[in-house]
Image (cartoon, rainbow, N blue to C red):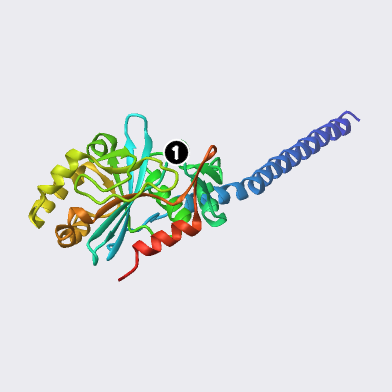
Amino acid sequence: MKRSAGKIFIKGMLLSFIIVAILLSAGILGYRLTMHFFKAPEEKAIVAYQDETVPETVTEASVDDISRNLIFCYDEKTSEITKIVLEIFHCGKKKITYITIPMRTQLTMSDSLYRKMLLVNPEIPQMMQLSVMTNYMDSDTVFDYGTLMLEDLLGIKISYYTVIPKSIYDTMFVSKKIKSSGAGASAAPAAEQNLPVEAFSKDYIKFVKTLKTEDDINNYIEDIYPKLITNLPLEEKQKYLESYSMTPLSNISFELMKGNDENSGYYVDPVLAASRLNELMKAN
């Protein structure tokens, strides 16, 4: 009887160990399967998000017979864009027009652009003033994506952009209300709102007058280019040298982007702005 009871006890112990082992194995297997199924979608989502937020090319520069150069004045101390000017250079007509786009300009992004911008910063609003762009993008991305925003706003393709540090920009441009021609450059009216327009400073006009040959202009461009940020390589910029040298100072004008100034901001008039831009970009 003692041996029989001992055998039963041993068999019971072994059976208990087997049952525990099976339960532990099932628990571990179930845990691994659960973690696998719950983690898989999350890993795929992260990879897809990274692929879309790091595009190979955001803006592509081009050399055009009628170039559209978007100029940003950038304050490196505050990391803010303080001025935006669109330079339209008609190489055939040898005319340059600088169009001031107020920083108070209200922008409503198209749905397609907004979806793209959400990948850059999910907190960026679809409607905002140009002055707050740097609140949602850092200096590595704001000029490229800022160019996309201005293309979206104006309905045109920007040839390239140029970022001028504020310390240099302030030696070239001044904000003033233009009502008549003066100081060697033709000056367009500052539109109905009589808002300030970005125009060449007197000292810069004097300097430009000293650039009499292609070599003079080339030396100036080569000297200042390393101080700028642009998506147009130096050798591409130099393709404009001949046209620059043949453009008289009297063919350089300054004006305001057509729109309406209201308490909530500046609103570009899509009809008037498009009409003016089309006029400036006519082939003949």
Q: Position of residue 171 (x, y in %)?
A: 22, 37
Q: Quadrant of the N terminus?
A: top right
**Residue drawn at the location 29% of the way across and 49% of the way down:** 187
Query: Count of labels shown?
Result: 1
Would you name the residue on which mark 1 appears? 131
Residue type pointed to by label 1: Ser
Q: Nearer the viewer, residue 86 or 27?
A: 86
Residue 37 point in image, percent of width and height: 66, 49
Local SS, label 1? helix
Q: Tell me if mark 1 has few (under 14), some (14-19) or many (20+) residues whose alpha carbon lies within 10 angstroms of its own.
A: some
Query: Which quadrant of the figure has residue 75?
Result: top left
- Residue 1 appears left or right of 247: right
Q: Nearer the viewer, residue 64 or 266?
A: 266
Seen from this angle, which residue lies furthest right? 1
Q: Position of residue 189 (x, y in %)?
A: 35, 49
Q: Is residue 211 left or right of residue 107?
A: left
Is residue 78 or residue 181 the one in the foreground? 181
Say which of 61 and 215 sits in front: 215
Left or right relative to 170: residue 263: right
**Residue 188 to residue 130: above or below:** below
